[in-house]
Image: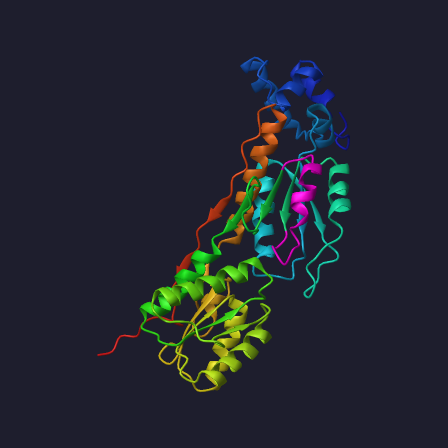
Amino acid sequence: MRQSERVTIKHVAQQAGVSTQTVSRVINERPDVASETRKRVLGVIQSLGYQPSELARSLIQRRSYMIGVVTAGLKFIGGPGRALNGITSAAEELGYALLLKELSSFDSDNFTSHQIRPLIQSLLARQVDGILWAVPDVGDNHAWVEKEIDAVQSPIVFLSMQTRPNLPVVCFDNYLGGQLATQHLLDLGRQCIGHISGPLDWWEARERKRAWEDTLRTAGQEPETGLCVTGNWSAQSGAEAFIQLLDSFPALDGIFVANDQMALSVLQIACRRGLCIPDDLAVVGFDDLAESAYFWPPLTTIRQDQTELGRCAVYELVNRVEALHDGIRLPDPLSVVLTPQLMIRESSRQTVTT
């Protein structure tokens, strides 16, 4: 064989002294191959550097080993970007390729898509084995599920969506995260605790705000009108919301901010106004961006591991794909709700006086 010639299954079979069918059985991990023969064929594959054709494997097994991933764009760096990292690593680990689709009609002001059916059809036309729906739950943009889900002929798993009966959903417990943040501020003895929420058409933002309200009420602190101001996840909106809170509530001594990007601006504005953090004002964010530990002061925040979210979603989907391929009854759809963690840093750490 010439050095520049591409190694084929025939070369492997010839050098191993077996048929091409036997080589194919070894590649596809069929049980009907003698252990010595399997060992010899694998040794030849390694020595020749043979790379099996993914197309051939797909045709033989009637599978594409491809997962369709639907996103609403990666500009929302607090979640979708990191979740995609987890999706990518888990898919590669399990031997699947990704086909990424973006809902083109999504923008920062209008999260309603009218392209659901053609988008799903385009993925199915490319023979994806399953679909990950990694689109934030905003407004009624998931209303299509009840009408269209039966038309999705491949397994599908939803990310970061409100749990629904009979649908496989992987998400974080945003309500618990909001409870942890607010209770931490209460435990510090803060008496006037405000909240900067995300846009309230987002399910995640509503959950975090609801937890803030409920936790304050449980502690006997009725949230006053105006103690919650809505942002749009951006640092600029966080600054504007915080200034509004300070002007309305000069006694503000604690604040739960619905994401770390908005919390960054809170730290900056507080410094400009001469407030000492955490003595005058304790600040808690949400997400635990990689940069949050390097803000000044380092930000106390609610950690939700979006990379792990993406990985869990892939595992859930592949389990369903494998069951379908093996002719096994698909497991009942279950929601996987991941637990967030409170990461205490200097922006709310209790100071010790002597």
Query: x and y percent of residue 110 in the render?
Result: 70, 63
Which residues are drawn in magenta?
Answer: 135-155
347 sits to left or right of 105:
left
Screen quadrant of the C terminus? bottom left
Q: Would you say residue 325 sits in the magenta stretch?
A: no
Query: x and y percent of residue 300 in the render?
Result: 42, 67
Q: Picture quarter containing residue 128?
A: top right
Question: Which one is nearer the viewer's eye here, 2 or 187?
Answer: 187
Q: Residue at x 53, y 62 (%)?
A: 206
Query: x and y percent of residue 341 in the render?
Result: 41, 56
Q: Residue at x 51, y 43 (%)?
A: 335
Query: x and y percent of residue 59 in the render?
Result: 73, 26
Is 90 above or below relative to 271? above
Camera sees residue 176: yes
Colour style of the rendered protein structure: rainbow
Q: Residue at x 63, y 23 (%)?
A: 28
Dominant secondary-structure state across the stretch colored magenta: loop
Screen quadrant of the N terminus? top right
Question: Which one is nearer the viewer's eye here, 313 or 249?
Answer: 249
Q: Residue at x 26, y 75 (%)?
A: 352
Is 311 above or below relative to 332? below
